Amino acid sequence: MPDAESPRVAYFSMEIALDAGIPTYSGGLGMLAGDTLRSAADLAVPMVAVTLLYRRGYFHQRLDARGQQTEEPTVWRVEDRLEPLRARASVEIAGRTVHLGVWRYTIQGAGGAALPVYLLDADRPENDPDDRALTAELYGGDARHRLAQEIILGIGGVRMLRALGHEGLGTFHMNEGHAALIAVALLDEMEASGGGEAATASATLKAELLAALRERCVFTTHTPVPAGHDRFPADLVERLLTPAWKARLAMCGQVDGLNMTQLAIAVSRFVNGVALKHGEVSRAMFPGVDVRSITNGVHAATWASPPFQRLFDKWAPGWRLDNAALRNIIGAHGDEVWTAHLEAKQSLVEFLGERGHAGFDRDALTLVWARRATGYKRPQLIFESLERLKSMTRYIGPLQIIFAGKAHPRDEEGKGLIRSIHEVAGQLRGKVPVAYIENYDMAVAQKLVAGADVWVNTPRPPMEASGTSGMKAAMNGVPSLSVLDGWWIEGHIEGATGWAVGEYVADDENPENDRKVAHALYEKLAKVVLPCYFKDREEFIAIMRRTVAFSGSFFNTHRMVEEYLVNAYRLQGGWRPRSEPAKPE
């Protein structure tokens, strides 16, 4: 890290969205991780990151004419994107030694600092063929495969950092529970340095070791649903982990199987959710645990489209390092905001044409719903009454809807939702254009968040931990039309940054609740959103300005990283962000 102090924070994540051409992510968790690291690099935070190398990525989504999803491996050339390093480490899994190589991706910050990301690779010739495949796919395989991957990430990740010479790390940040086996590796190190053997230590010594471990770890949970937390049965733990590792887990309270979230909580000095509401939900899930809240954000320079970046350069100089400067967009001229938006929207229309979706109009109100396709996100709500949708188009103005999102390969409900959207698209043909964009990834997301007129989000509360797609849209002045859940509870200012769909109601999956939310969605569209867009364009542009000034200036990863620095990493005393380099005349 040129001109910066040695790394003091190690950030571990099962997935990281580094670049559109590096498919080592599946969705929101990886996007958040990538944005976090980009902001940390911009701010010259002394940090390194660890993840796994997935040579076959997550999966490439194919959709046929009826919306049937099939999955294919993602083909990419690792050598073209990453730098191989000579360091080596190993872990023991099910009695075999698994040798690990490592590749580096360097994030260059806006202020000149460099942040290394290390990707662990088990595809080594000295490994058993089954072990070589352990880092091939993200979230592939069964529970055994998943636990083996988490051994590589947590234990192998710490060992690889030591092999790379990173000895001064004071904080290990677990981005979700996948990395919780960091605890085992750190306890190994304590024992090797004379801290006492976990298996035979006295109760007092065990308490001291655990207290010392807690001083080194922080944990961010992203999942408000109990089923979303990794758990492994005792017989699987017995087969895969060494006796010494199991003794360390027992010291951390894991004696009958392995609950990765509970382990991460037990070994962390700081635990947080990713929105105010999510912190509240997490405290109810884990009684007695002091779960704080650090609301997520997005990396402004990654998600602002080129025309909006030019607008920001004019009205908010220095915004790339000081995202709070985006509040100055409140004073931008309306015609400049609208011109930038139309340029981004035209780019989206052309992109749709290239993907085989002709007939989309730059002048029609464009709604976008782009998320992982799964039941609780309820993409189908907007189709509750097709006649009412067609009526809005006839009497208020043209409307078009764009969807995108992958369903997990084993999520049959999610796949069914994609098929149903394709079916409805056929029923609405000629009245309300509907497109479903296949293979939603970072590059597709950049087009959608910039070219939408309104960002739609319809989750079933309180299952949306945070949600960051609406924050990405806000960076482009795109207001949200969303159910009150996750970040939108904090970001929503009615008529200023977008619109709420109904009131906050914790949903129990009652179909009647879905109908009520759909009715509220139609009411807001027909009586507020469409009339504003078509009949009061000046006010719609004012909403766009306020969306950037209020949401963009706060819901960004620069602000988020600074909260971690002060509250979780404790670096506020010795760390200072860089100033933006002077631009040539």
Image (tube, grey):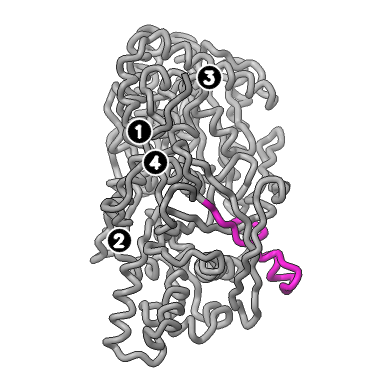
Q: Name the amino acid, label 1.
A: Asp
Question: How many numbered marks are there?
Answer: 4
State the SS at label 1: loop
Q: Is residue 125 in the magenta section?
A: yes
Which contiguous range is marked in magenta?
116-139
The correct choice, above or below, for 433 with respect to 551 in the image is above
State the SS at label 4: helix
CA distance for labels 3 and 1: 24 Å
Mark toward the start of the polypeptide (1 vs 2): 2
Closer to the observer: label 1 or label 2?
A: 1
Instruction: Check residue 270 in the rendering and tell me which mark sits there, or answer none.
Output: 2
Give residue 154's position: percent from left, percent from top.
50, 67
Residue located beneath label 3 in the image: 344
Is disc 3 in contact with disc 1, using a CB cutoff of under 8 Å? no
Residue located beneath label 1 in the image: 322
| Label 3 crowd (10 A; few <14 / some 14-19 / many >=20) | many
Give residue 138's position: percent from left, percent from top.
60, 56
Mark toward the start of the polypeptide (3 vs 1): 1
Residue located beneath label 4 in the image: 557
State the SS at label 2: strand
Mark toward the start of the polypeptide (3 vs 4): 3
